[in-house]
Image (cartoon, rainbow, N blue to C red):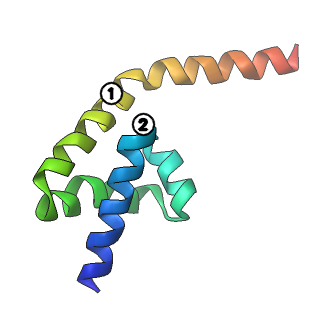
Amino acid sequence: MKEGLEKRAQELAVYVIETGATVRAAARHFGISKSTVHKDLTVRLEQYDKILSAQVRGVLDENKRERHIRGGMATKRKYERMG
């Protein structure tokens, strides 16, 4: 069981690093919950691969800094469709 968790965490990490995906997008892509993605990337990966974990942390931090922009863009698109 543990090997499966490690493999999933590594696959998630590679996907997030290569695509810059958000936790929500990664969860949708892999068909798992956002909570699982977050735990895999922040807790489990740290135990298995510290270098990969640091790279993922950089992407997650960047996504967090930009989330207000993405939210504003989504709101803008919503009102453009309505208008």
Closer to us: 48 or 77: 48
Q: Where is residue 36 in the image (x, y as percent from the top left)?
A: 38, 63
In the image, residue 77 above or below residue 7: above
Q: Residue 62 carries which label?
A: 1
Answer with left or right where residue 54 lies relative to residue 80.
left
For the N terminus, which image quadrant? bottom left
Badge 1 or badge 2: first in the primary sequence = 2
Q: Which mark is residue 17?
A: none
Q: Residue at x 57, y 55 (%)?
A: 28
- Of badges 1 and 2, the one in the foreground is 2
Instruction: Residue type at mark 1: give it.
Output: Glu
For the C terminus, which image quadrant? top right
Q: Which mark is residue 20?
A: 2
**Do labels 1 and 2 touch, CB within 8 Å?**
yes
Mark 1 to mark 2: distance in Å?
A: 9 Å
Q: Where is residue 78 in the image (x, y as percent from the top left)?
A: 75, 23
Helix, strand, or loop for circle 2? loop
Closer to us: 60 or 74: 60
In the image, residue 31 above or below residue 71: below
Q: Where is residue 13 in the image (x, y as percent from the top left)?
A: 33, 52
Helix, strand, or loop for circle 1? helix
Instruction: Residue type at mark 2: give it.
Output: Gly
Answer with left or right where residue 71 lies relative to residue 57.
right
**Residue 80 quadrant:** top right
Q: Which residue is drawn at 19% across and 49% down?
A: 53
Q: Position of residue 54 (x, y in %)?
A: 17, 43
Closer to us: 8 or 28: 8
| Mark 1 closeness class: few <14, some 14–19, many ≥20 residues within 10 Å | few
